[in-house]
Image: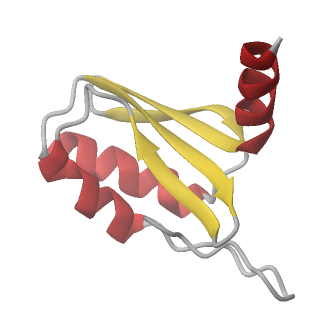
Amino acid sequence: MAVVLVLFLRHVRVRFVIDLNGGKARVRRGDPPAAFVRGCSEVARLYRLSSGRIFGIRSGNGIELRFSKEIPDRAHQPLRNMWVPPSSGGPGGNRAAG
């Protein structure tokens, strides 16, 4: 039962999922900013990423970006640099953390 609860809570926290396939980014779930998706495509082409997933996870500090194991560590920071959180107009925001 505890495993099911953990999986459910994790699923609820996922704001978006972006698939990288052949140097192109495609939104699989959620509604990330279009400029971020385009930036992910650019980074995927530059780093020759053939596959992988980028997750936007809601946290206490906004949205954290997480990466599947197919995306090498050297590509994490350029992808984070592309992330410009949408303005929320209120406290808390969607600031990227991590």
Q: Which quadrant of the structure image shows residue 29? A: top right
Front one among 38 and 49: 49
The number of numbered discs placed on residues in the rendered structure image is 0
Q: Is residue 80 left or right of residue 83?
A: left
At a point 63% along the width and 60% down the height, the residue shown is 33
Quarter of the image with the N terminus in it: top right
Q: Is residue 35 left or right of residue 67?
A: right
Q: x and y percent of residue 7 in the render?
A: 72, 22
* Above or below, comparing residue 17 to residue 3 in the picture: below
Q: x and y percent of residue 51 in the render?
A: 30, 22
At a point 67% along the width and 60% down the height, the residue shown is 59
Q: Which quadrant of the structure image shows residue 69? A: top left
Q: Which quadrant of the structure image shows residue 66? A: top left
Q: x and y percent of residue 77 in the render?
A: 25, 62
Front one among 7 and 72: 7
* Above or below, comparing residue 47 to residue 49 in the picture: below
Q: Is residue 19 left or right of residue 76?
A: right
Quarter of the image with the C terminus in it: bottom left
At a point 83% along the width and 88% down the height, the residue shown is 91
At a point 38% along the width and 49% down the height, the residue shown is 40
